[in-house]
Amino acid sequence: MALIEQCLILAAGNGSRLRTISGELPKPLVDFQGMPILEHIVRNAQQASIEEFVIVLGYRGELIRDWFESRWTGKARFTWVVNPDYHKSNGVSALKARHAIHDNFLLLMADHLFQPKTARMMVREYLEPGEVVLAVDSKIDRIFDLDDATKVRRRGDRIVEIGKELEEYDAIDTGMFSCTPALFDDLERAGKDGNCSLSDGMRRVAWREQFRAREIGDAEWHDLDTPEAFAHAFAESLVYA
């Protein structure tokens, strides 16, 4: 039985780098292989026995909510959280959902595609109090647009550093985290002038020595952050549904 039953998805950003594909649509509603990106994410998380989703909205978020309320078919339960400060870093969006998260949870990005087997692995991770587990990819030579990827450096199975600008690293952040609610305290404490990124909060978790890495093995994933990354993912012809 899955130890995690709730999923937080950050879907608030304005997706400016994908605008040539998305037009005026919010990025989570952009079609990929016949369905919106966010629908792929929700349905694949459901294959890991998750049915409760907390989704943080921002840029044109009413379109996302309207799409799911009018077209979604299935048993999933949705809680919608609005982040009016969606122009700030993604840690702010995560903090907006604090009141809606009741226990350990899976944290996902609304533009990171993954295969269901990765989610099934992550929801079964045992978490110590205050711990965060990040799904990492050590197949660095296969990463598309490595310069833009968030990198991690490990010591054993513990992550000691995370960030896009790391010069020494041994794996890549795939955008999937198994978390305890203590993460919200780390994000809050990491904030400066009302702003913080997820990586800011994760650095505090690493400082506490409670940031653990979990290898995804041969599983595939894609960050659909730019038109080039979108085209690369499409060309890979992986079926994410």
Image: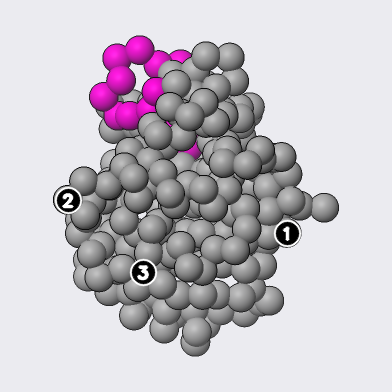
Q: Is residue 234 visible?
A: no
| In front of the other: 9 or 219 | 9
Given contact means CB atoms under 8 Å apart, are the residues at marks 1 and 2 in contact? no
In percent of the image, x 30 and y 29: which residue is there? 164
In percent of the image, x 50 and y 84: which residue is there? 69
Q: Residues within 10 Å of mark 1 (few under 14, many from 20)?
A: some
Q: Residues within 10 Å of mark 3 (few under 14, many from 20)?
A: many
In percent of the image, x 58 and y 38: which residue is there? 131
**Quick one: quadrant of the C terminus?**
bottom right
Q: Position of residue 139 (x, y in %)?
A: 51, 21
Whether residue 63 is situated above or below residue 87 in the rendered picture: below
Q: Residue 6 lies in what quarter of the image?
A: bottom right
Left or right of 62, for residue 177: right
Q: Position of residue 195 (x, y in %)?
A: 23, 51
Range of magenta residues: 161-174
* Residue 164 belongs to magenta span: yes
| In front of the other: 186 or 55 | 186
Q: Tell me how many marks there are.
A: 3
How far separated are the C-alphas under marks 2 and 3? Answer: 22 Å
For the residue marked with disc 2, what is the amino acid?
Asp
Q: Is residue 66 visible?
A: yes
| In front of the other: 18 or 120 | 120
For the residue marked with disc 3, what is the amino acid?
Leu
Task: State the SS at label 2.
Answer: loop
How far separated are the C-alphas under marks 1 and 2? Answer: 38 Å
Number of the front mark, 2 or 3: 2
Res. 49 mark: 1
Res. 57 mark: 3
Whether residue 72 is situated above or below residue 162 in the rendered picture: below
For the residue marked with disc 1, what is the amino acid?
Ser
Q: Which residue is mark 2?
A: 193
